[in-house]
Image (cartoon, rainbow, N blue to C red):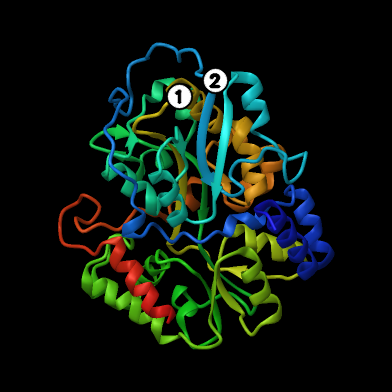
Amino acid sequence: MGLVDRDRLRRARLGALLGVGGLALAACAQAGAVSVARPVRGPSPSATPTATSVATPVATPSPTPSASIGKGEGTLRVLTFQGYVEYGGTSSRVNWLTPFERETGCVVKLDRVRTSEEMAARFATGGYDAVSPAADLAGLLVAGGKVAPLDTALVEDYKRIPKRLRELPGLREDGRVYGIPYLWGVNQVVSEEGVPEGPSALYGTSPAAIRNSPLSIADAALALGERRPELKTEDPFQLTSAQLDAAVRLLAEGDGPDRVYWDGSLDLVRALSAGPVWIAQALPYHLDLFRRAGRPMKALEGVPMTGWVDSWMLAARPASPNCAYRWLNWVSSASAQRPAAAWTGLAPANPEACDGHARRMCEVYHVRDSRWLRDVVFATRPTRDCGGQGGECTDYTDWVERWKQLLK
């Protein structure tokens, strides 16, 4: 069974679990949002892309206007996650690739993967012009010189994207811009039995569902903020050894046979619908999905939450740089981000996309509410130098190993 067939099967099973309300939401959101809950596991050391030198001009965050993009080379190789770019293969109504090809004359050779580890392995083979890594992989690509700094003056809608997203540490280094924000999400604590009593409730003895990602350690570190102020955790994604130990210990305290570590939306829906789980780490999309299916749930509000931004980057040596910049223009536009948000169940980085099919996603993610977004701590790749801030922190490979031990 192919990838598209498996996605279609998962959507049908999700609708069956949720009943008429769930099917209504699937139709409203173009029926594709189950692909959002991919695991974000990050690359293993053996899957690290090979080093290449930067072949494009160095750009500053606010460069002077550059010359226009040159003539397209004819083809463009793109690497992204399943569901992030659709060409009508799953549904004829879900296609934001063909309009790009018609408008630019650049024919896209599209490769799609399910995990960051798979993306790193594919990218290492070379030949790609543009890639959309998650936060765990983006930092590695930038640090390793595998992606090129961008001339943002060539990206028309770049400044329409909120400054908060544009200036995330994982998308820039030494004053240079490396990533164009595309879609973003937030992890919330949701419950069926009243408002959760603080973020630590997720890690108690009650059966819970937690996202299967090493970066979920950051949520535990954030939950320890009030309980363990002596840890002095300033950034949940940049942890010292002591802070990492404390976060993993909190996760381990409530671990047991009834805990669910979910990889996809179907796993989470099944756990909350048929299993003993009543509290979970979930996305605003999931909360809205249950509510519209007649299953009232509540989310913990007014507390810090973790989130992530998936971006588009340019390969260090793109074979088709002009088509690649045309692609960056397209994926940062409302025309592309609107259907992408509706299909994935994530929020668009460009607020101009918040109408039509994407209106609902923008509402549940509070896209235009800057006060709500202040509670979101967006993910960066854990590094030994504490995200370039100095000090002695743990690396992402340490997080991966501790996560593997937890799941044994």
Residue 149 lies left or right of residue 408; in this view the side is: left
Location of residue 227 with respect to 206 vertically, above or below: above
- Depth check: 298 or 402 in front? 402
**Of pointers 1 and 2, the one earlier in the residue sequence:** 2
Secondary structure of the residue carrying tag 1 is: loop
Q: Where does the image place residue 108, in percent across and percent down from the top left?
A: 58, 31
Location of residue 203 with respect to 31 vertically, above or below: below
Residue 189 lies left or right of residue 13; in this view the side is: left
Q: Amino acid at mark 2?
A: Gly
The residue tagged 2 is 74
Q: Where does the image place residue 99, in percent across and percent down from the top left?
A: 67, 26
Residue 229 lies left or right of residue 261; in this view the side is: left
The residue shown at (65%, 41%) is 86
Q: Amino acid at mark 1?
A: Ser
- Point out the image quarter for the N terminus: bottom right
Q: Where does the image place residue 132, in percent across and percent down from the top left?
A: 47, 42
The residue tagged 1 is 320
The residue shown at (15%, 54%) is 390
Whether residue 375 appears in this view of the structure is no
- Depth check: 68 or 167 in front? 68
Location of residue 355 with respect to 219 vertically, above or below: above
Q: Quadrant of residue 65?
A: top left
Q: Where does the image place residue 72, in percent across and percent down from the top left?
A: 51, 17
